[in-house]
Structures are given as C-alpha cells and as structure tokens.
Image (tube, rainbow, N blue to C red):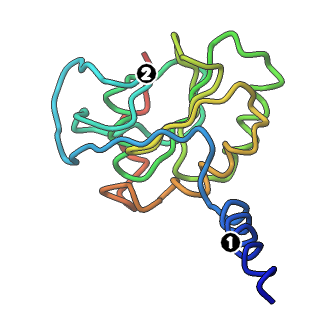
C-alpha cells in the first residue's frame, strides 16, 4: 500500500496540467472601463488590449484596411475579440482567419502594421500572439473571450457605431 502513495501526487499533477483551461502564451492586463476620450491615443500594447478609447465603438466585422485603435478598443470593452494580422500575411492564412471569425458576431478582423507576430488576438485585458492562422489557441482565445467575463460592458452593441477604417 505504501508504494502507491508516492505515485498519487504525480498522477494528480498530471491530471491538473492536462485539464488546465489556460492558453499557452496568453498575456493579461488590467484596465479600468469607461474612459472615453477623443483624438489619437497612445497604448501600452501593440495592438491595444484595453484602456482609454473613443466614445464610439467599431462595428464588428471583417475589414481589409487597418482600424483606428481608439474605436476598436471600445468594441473590446463591449466583449469583442479583435484579431489582427500583418498586412503581408499570405492570402491562405487571411482566408483561414476569415473562416475562424465567420458567424461570430462579436469579432473584428483587420490588418495591422507593425505587429510583434504575424497574428495577434486581443480582448479586453488579454492578448495572444501566434505565428500561424491555424494555431488552435486562436479558437480557444475566441471561445474564452468573445463576450467573456473580462469585458466590462459585455453585451453592449457591436454595430451601429463607427464603420470606417484608417
């Protein structure tokens, strides 16, 4: 009987690690909500994952041109996930990203200059950087953060706001 006890903690640790709902590489941040400001703003992350933002939000959808950070961040506050990609990302990967967000009403998809990795997913207070559009962590991020618990104004509109691009 005694020989089994040293094995038990190892088994429990393995089950905990396998059953973890964490997303490898996820970065989290803390921001106060409701800080509406006009004009161009400076953000700590690139692209931003929260903070002060324009009083109007970005309409959720797929865009072929870059978005203004200030409108997109307001959409994050409403529970949207913003997936950005480098403008030179190959067409097959862009198509994969479009497929990933298809049918998801609280998502933004747009190119973004100067990204730290080819694809970055951002939500209010959370961000994930990946190398490929088919990385399974992107879907996990969407499942966790689209209308997720970190959104201060979850359920607020993601349409009827600003629909333009830069």
Q: In terms of secondary structure, where does tag 2 sit?
A: loop
Query: Quadrant location of the N terminus?
Result: bottom right
Q: Quadrant of residue 10?
A: bottom right
Q: Earlier in the sequence, mark 2 or mark 1?
A: 1
**Other-residue count near label 2 (Cα within 10 Å), few / some / many at <14 / 14–19 / ≥20:** some
What is the tally of numbered marks visible in this picture? Answer: 2
Q: Residue at x 37, y 52 (%)?
A: 78
121 sits to left or right of 13:
left
Image position of 13 with respect to 137: above or below: below
Q: Residue at x 83, y 24 (%)?
A: 92
Q: Residue at x 43, y 21 (%)?
A: 46
Q: Quadrant of residue 4?
A: bottom right
Q: How far is disc 2 from disc 1 in space, using C-alphas?
A: 41 Å
57 sits to left or right of 145:
left
Q: In terms of secondary structure, where does tag 1 sit?
A: helix
**Farthest bottom residue?**
1
Q: Which residue is mark 1?
A: 9
Image position of 31 with respect to 133: above or below: below
Residue 65 can be seen in this image: no
Q: Quadrant of residue 13?
A: bottom right
Instruction: Tell me where residue 40 appears, x and y as whole percent.
Output: 24, 17
Front residue (pair 149, 75):
149
Instruction: Tell me where residue 159 appears, x and y as whole percent.
Output: 43, 47
Q: Residue at x 22, y 48 (%)?
A: 33
Can you tell which mark lies on residue 46? 2
């Amino acid at each position: 009987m005694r020989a089994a006890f040293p094995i038990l903690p190892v088994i429990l640790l393995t089950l905990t690690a396998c059953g973890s709902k964490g997303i490898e590489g996820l970065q989290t941040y803390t921001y106060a909500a409701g800080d509406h400001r006009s004009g161009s703003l400076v953000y700590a992350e690139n692209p931003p994952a929260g903070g002060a933002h324009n009083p109007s939000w970005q309409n959720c959808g797929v865009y072929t041109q870059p978005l203004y950070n200030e409108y997109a961040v307001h959409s994050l506050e409403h529970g949207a996930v913003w997936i950005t990609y480098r403008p030179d990302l190959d067409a097959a990967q862009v198509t994969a990203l479009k497929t990933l967000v298809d049918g998801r009403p609280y998502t933004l998809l747009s190119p973004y200059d100067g990204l730290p990795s080819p694809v970055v997913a951002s939500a209010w207070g959370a961000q994930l950087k990946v190398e490929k559009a088919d990385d399974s962590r992107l879907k996990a991020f969407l499942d966790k953060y689209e209308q997720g618990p970190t959104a201060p104004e979850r359920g607020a509109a993601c349409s009827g706001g600003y629909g333009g691009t830069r």
